[in-house]
Amino acid sequence: MLAALLYYLPHSTLISAALFLLAGRIAAVRGESGDGLVRAAPMPGRGWLSAAFLLLAVAVSGLPPLSGFLGKLMLLSAAPATAAGYVLWVVFIVSGFVAALGLARAASTLFWERDAAALPATATAGQAGALALALALGFVPALVLGAAPLSAYARATAEQLAAQQPYLRSVLPAGAAAVAREVRP
């Protein structure tokens, strides 16, 4: 389970960062509507922004074929066959569904619903924001293509964290039988 969590950590960090960059980019080009989930005039450049939103929504929801699905699959396969494990299954599946539903609703409001009375939005966002977002989007396929080495590294890290004896041998002086512990009243 620890290896699965260590695999999922870079995915969730990088995808969340990309979503924040995308939200900033959308707010910058929406004009007066900013980052509010309200109907607005059509955005300039909404084609690539909506494609980026779709890619990140699929990744954060844990849908195949992206790394979020691989991370959730690793977590679910590591869940014990007990009542607690079955609760984890339900939580992971329902959370993915709720995330997909919420992001689909947000995408509908941002990219398809129009307010005819709103002033047209103008592209005022700088190119640095677009470059940062493009770089962050590059991590989505990189996490999928690097899934095997990343999961192997996470597994090796989890094994090292679980192995206490090698650490104790390297830290304690040779020949030390036991560590004296402080006794508190």
Image (cartoon, helix red, strand yellow):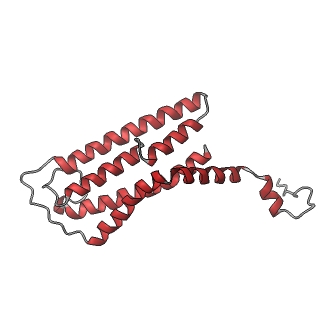
Closer to the camera in the image, 18 or 185: 18
Closer to the camera in the image, 126 or 116: 126
- Quadrant assignment, res 129: bottom left
How many circles with numbers are drawn on the protein?
0
Residue under the point 85% across and 55% down: 183
Q: Left of 184 or right of it: where is 153?
A: left
Residue under the point 26% across and 43% down: 105
Residue 151 location (% of width, % of height):
57, 50
Residue 165 location (% of width, % of height):
80, 53
Q: Which quadrant: the N terminus?
A: top right
Closer to the camera in the image, 123 or 45: 45
Q: Left of 12 or right of it: where is 38?
A: left
Inspect this view and state whether residue 84 appears: yes
Residue sticking out furthest to the left: 117
Residue under the point 50% across and 54% down: 146
Q: Left of 85 or right of it: where is 97?
A: left
Inspect this view and state whether residue 15 appears: no
Residue under the point 22% across and 60% down: 34
Closer to the camera in the image, 176 or 179: 176
Residue 30 location (% of width, % of height):
19, 60
Residue 113 location (% of width, % of height):
15, 46
Q: Left of 175 or right of it: where is 75?
A: left
